[in-house]
Image: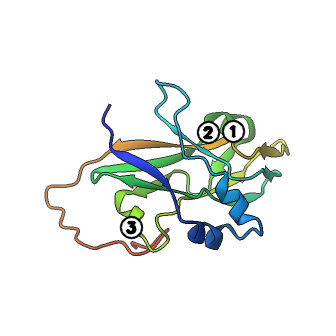
Amino acid sequence: MKRIAEFHKVSLEQFKADCKKENAEAIYSGIKLPARATKGSAGYDFFAPYDIALKAGETAKIPTGIRAEINEGWVLSIYPRSGLGFKYRLQLDNTVGIIDSDYFFSDNEGHIMIKVTNCSNEGKTVFIPKGSGFAQGIFTEYGITVSDNAEAKRNGGFGSTD
C-alpha cells in the first residue's frame, strides 16, 4: 500500500469557531482521528464528535475536527457509512465530499465538515452515538489532462474555487 496522507486535528480555536456548541472544548478533547476498522478496509471511518439524532428529513452539519494532509495527485472522497445509508437512507448533502490536497492549507485549516440528511421514507430516526463511525473516507489517485495549466492557489473552504 502507498502511504500518501496523514490525518490531524484542527486547532482548538478553529474547532470552536466551527462547532458552535458551548462545550466545544470538551468535545474537541474527545475527537478521534479517522481509522480503518480492518486490514482489508478501503475506508477510514470518521467518528461522531458528539451524539447526533436526526428525525426523517432533518439535516446536520457535523464539524469533524479533522483535517487531511494529502500528497499531491491524491484526493479524499467522503461517503456515508454503508450501514447507515442502507438502514436510514442517511446521505451526504453533496452526495460525495471531495477533499483536495490543497484544502489542508485553507484559511479554515482544511477542517472537514460533513453535512448529512436522514432521508428515511419510513419516518425512522437515526441516532449516531458520540465516537461511532458515521462517514468514511477513501483516498484515490487521480490524473490530469496533458494540456492542464491550473496555477491558482486555494484560499478558502467549500465552494471556494468556483
The image quarter containing residue 18 is: bottom right
- Whole-angstrom CA distance, mark 2 to mark 1, is 6 Å
Task: Check residue 84 in the rendering and tell me which mark sits there, or answer none.
Answer: 1
> What amino acid does circle 2 point to?
Arg
> What amino acid does circle 1 point to?
Leu
Within 10 angstroms of label 3, few (less than 14), some, or many (20 or more) residues? some
Q: Earlier in the sequence, mark 3 or mark 1?
A: 1
Image label count? 3
> Could you tell me which secondary element the residue under label 2 belongs to?
loop
- Whole-angstrom CA distance, mark 3 to mark 1, is 31 Å
> What amino acid does circle 3 point to?
Phe
> Could you tell me which secondary element the residue under label 3 belongs to?
helix
Q: Earlier in the sequence, mark 2 or mark 3?
A: 2
x and y, in percent, of residue 63 in the image: 63, 60
Left or right of 20 in this view: 155? left
Viewer-nearest residue: 162 or 71: 71
At x 67% / y 51%, what residue is drawn? 30
x and y, in percent, of residue 117 in the image: 70, 54
At x 65% / y 70%, what residue is drawn? 16
Locate the C terminus and report the quarter of the image it occupies. bottom left
Looking at the image, do the residues carrying marks 2 and 3 touch, with CB atoms under 8 Å apart? no
Within 10 angstroms of label 1, few (less than 14), some, or many (20 or more) residues? some
Q: Which residue is mark 3?
A: 105
Left or right of 49 in this view: 106? left
Viewer-nearest residue: 104 or 151: 104
Left or right of 49 in this view: 77? left
Looking at the image, do the residues carrying marks 3 and 1 touch, with CB atoms under 8 Å apart? no
Q: Which residue is mark 2?
A: 81
Left or right of 161 in this view: 86? right
